[in-house]
Amino acid sequence: MKKIWKAREFSSFLFLAGLIFMVGLVNRSFWQPAAILNCFNDSVVFTLLAAGIAFVILTGEIDVSIGAVLGLSAAVGAALLRDGHGVVTAFLAAIAIGILTGLVNGIGVALFNIPSLIFTLGVNGVVRGMIYVYTKGAWVENLPAGFTRMSNRTLAGNLTVFYALAVIVVILGHLILTRTKKGKYFIAVGDNAAGATLVGIPADKTKIMAYVLCGVFASAAGMIYASRIGFITPTAGNGYEMKAIAACVLGGLSLNGGIGSLAGASIGAVIMSSISRILVFLGFSSDYDNTITGVMLLTIVVINTVAQNRAAAKNRHQILSARTAEKGGEKR
């Protein structure tokens, strides 16, 4: 119980539960099972995005191109479906985009040592431009009805199939990170890349794999986005990277790397995707969504940074005190 209580994911879960409770006090209809389930169903895209970028954040890097990757994957997959190709073909084409983009990001950051924020920001611009070139600035519409109906398929209790699959993927990813040797490489690299290399962990390959996985998750999210929305605009996925990063931070991941889990990221994704719905239940306009997201991200990052700085200062003070005590003993 002590281990569960101290887990960062548990704090995120308590925050989500408290949020649901507080909103329900204002508007009792939010406590209806259907309303709560809708919060989870609506989070499927951000759950995949947050889980994907969690691999990158755990290695101590960042990826701000996932929104554009989602948009391009959705546009290409939707166009193939519109032109009569099968779902499998469209899905594989989307995944190929994610793998290729992830490789480019990983090679640029890991092998060429380019700061991840700068490099992925450049890739974001390139990929976003490719969406406009591919779609010629037009919407991708008239998707097959069978594909758009897939997002409405539910299991028991109105939980959608897409969200159930996303939860399964997150659980598998969490188990790989925490129970397998190579899965633990991601956290080891984020904690201390130089030290990880000294003990034989391939830090560069691990970072490249993290970016590839991030791209794959973003592409899968793009296909689900296409099924849910039913059409794709050239601006699809714009700004989603900020919400995915905020979801990870809310879920207990440290932007410095080495701390956190996919489970926490998925809980944070539910919180971030629920903001628009919560605003409606509270009687506010959803126009405040991005503002609240930014404020929450800044607040949590500041709190985490201050806490980490205090912990580091306390640790240095303890080391200094220990050394002083040793020197005093030697003089005696």
Image (cartoon, rainbow, N blue to C red):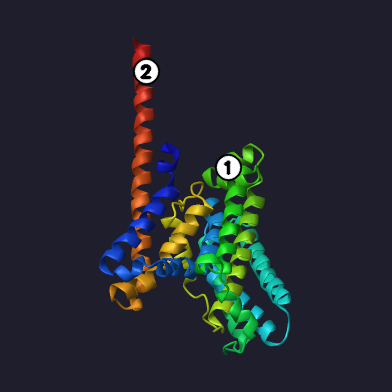
Name the residue located 56 percent from the left edge and 67 percent from the top edge. 155
Question: From this viewpoint, which residue is outermost toward the left?
Answer: 26
Name the residue located 49 percent from the left edge and 58 percent from the top edge. 266
Examine the rendered structure and indicate whether residue 59 appears above or below residue 24: above
Name the residue located 70 percent from the left edge and 87 percent from the top edge. 83
In which quadrant is the C terminus drawn?
A: top left
Mark 1 and mark 2: Cα distance apart in space:
31 Å
Q: Is residue 243 left or right of residue 76?
A: left
Q: Is residue 127 visible?
A: no
Name the foreground residue: 168 vs 62. Answer: 168
Give neighbour class at mark 1: few <14, some 14-19, many 20+ (Cα, 10 Å).
few
Q: Mark 1 or mark 2: which is in front?
A: 1
Q: Position of residue 175 (x, y in %)?
A: 60, 48
Name the foreground residue: 281 vs 138. Answer: 281
Q: Is residue 327 left or right of residue 220?
A: left
**In terms of secondary structure, where does tag 2 sit?**
helix
In which quadrant is the N terminus drawn?
A: top left
Identified by mark 1, the residue type is Ala
- Contact (CB < 8 A) between labels 1 and 2? no
Q: Earlier in the sequence, mark 1 or mark 2?
A: 1
The residue that mark 2 highlights is 327
Examine the rendered structure and indicate whether residue 7 appears above or below residue 48: above
The residue that mark 1 highlights is 194
Splitting the image into 4 quarters, where does residue 49 fall? bottom right
Q: Position of residue 289 (x, y in %)?
A: 37, 73
